[in-house]
Image (cartoon, rainbow, N blue to C red):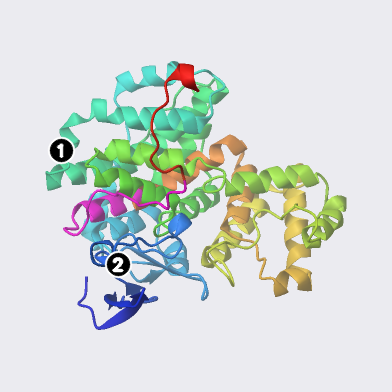
Amino acid sequence: MTKSTKNATLTIDGETYELPMFSPSTGPDVIDIRKLYSQAGVFTYDPGFTSTASCDSTITFIDGGKGELLHRGYPIDQLASKSHYLEVCYLLLYGELPTSADLEDFENTITHHTMIHEQMHNFFRGFRRDAHPMATMVGVVGAMSAFYQDSSDIGDPRQREIASHRMIAKMPTIAAMAYKYSVGQPFVYPRNDLDHASNFLNMCFSVPAEEYVVNPILSRAMDRIFTLHADHEQNASTSTVRLASSSGANPFACIAAGIACLWGPAHGGANQACLEMLKEIGTPDRIPEFIARAKDKDDPFRLMGFGHRVYKNFDPRATVMKQSADEVLDLLGVENNPILQVAKELEAAALADPYFAEKKLFPNVDFYSGIILEAMGFPTSMFTPIFAVSRTVGWISQWKEQFEDPQQKIGRPRQLYLGETERDYVDVENR
């Protein structure tokens, strides 16, 4: 952390306290309150931590007002258009774009870590056939620490690196197996001759009975979904991983905690909620009705997939994702899929409506990624697992950064207690 260049003054009951302030490389200044309790005997109150910096980081920066998302300083639209997922993984993990030799070595390492321990197959068969794939992933990823004990010593830098590579490599395999198990099809082993995204699609959609050839347009679209969801600063699941990591938990347990948090519909389920809304609309002729409801302040209905909590003008990821959505729909068509017909016409209607322009309710990354995954043939239950596959590298990068930060302590949030004050126990016969 840089040295404090100025102070904030806080006055409580006539007593004045000087709080150091730090200026980041970009973004708003922060007030250091670490000594506030010891000096003034008070806590700060910030439900949801929306105005609290829990750490310093060099990985990802978001400016919601400008619609800006940077990974190690590189704009997300450039990375999604010019790079690919495994190169972005290297960037997030190591801080710089790789040389061609570094990238080749990294891709080779990830490719040759994609298989999982054969005994782990038994875990899948222990779940009910109708189990949600996220439930399966939470259990299986948590169990990895029982199978990969040679990379669970977090004090060893080399073991931390091996664990990082294993998580990035094996998560697509685990997600694909969860999908195959849910639909009653045999597991498909990873193939070292395919790129990362193509390998995932092959594990999801190929069957032993016939050859499956991955279309390069679909592979590129999947790679962009991975890239655009790779990291998103200190969101709920990333903060969960960091909090679990602060206790010294092994990396597999920390990532399992992140998956569990991502499962929540307010976090990782946005693209699934978007598709469910499109199904509710049903047919294009009902779009005006739902747009009218979205404008009605007294109607609780909201258009899912439009606008964003963080991005107040536009989602920088959406432009690239829209390009992929258009390419996928041109390839696969929408004629026989009423959901995709509704999506295309709803997008056009919302973009043409002055109300949505005024409110900055733009189609976001979840709207377009949901369309792509629906067109590819994924059920909505797989949308969040695919998000988990994408976000694994972000979680791992944040976990690695936190562990190597000498300032970090075990997470211990405070509270505003509003319960009963001390009282004496009353024997049961006297109550």
Q: Is residue 1 left or right of residue 306?
A: left
> Label 1 amino acid?
Asp
The one nearer the camera, 140 or 344, is 140
Examine the image and state in which quarter residue 32 appears. bottom left
Identify whether 147 is placed above or below 415. above
Residue drawn at x 16%, y 41% is 159
Would residue 334 be found to the left or right of residue 108 on screen? right
Residue 192 at least partly seen: no
Front residue of 162/238: it is 238
Q: Look at the magenta stretch and give its main secondary structure.
A: loop
The image position of residue 3, as x and y in percent, is 20, 77
Q: Which residue is found at the position 43% from the left and 27% from the top?
A: 188
Residue 268: percent from left, percent from top: 52, 46
Picture layout, residue 79 above or below residue 372 = below
- Foreground label between 2 and 1: 2
Residue type indicated by callout 2: Ile
Q: Which residues are magenta?
A: 395-418
Q: Secondary structure at mark 1?
A: loop
Question: Measuring 21% from the left and 58% from the top, which residue is drawn there?
Answer: 101
Image position, residue 265 (x, y; %): 57, 43
Q: Is residue 412 magenta?
A: yes
Query: In the image, is 391 to the left or to the right of 269?
Result: left
Mark 2 vs 1, N-terminal side? 2
Report the front residue among 1 and 149: 1
Q: Which residue is the extreme one toward the left?
A: 156
Which circle marks residue 153 in the picture?
Answer: 1
Per the model, the C-alpha gap separating discs 2 and 1 is 33 Å
Location of residue 168 in the rendering, given as x and y in whole percent from the top left corner: 33, 44
The answer to whether any part of residue 298 appears in the image is yes
Q: Dot 2 lies on which element?
A: loop
Q: Which residue position holds label 2?
A: 33
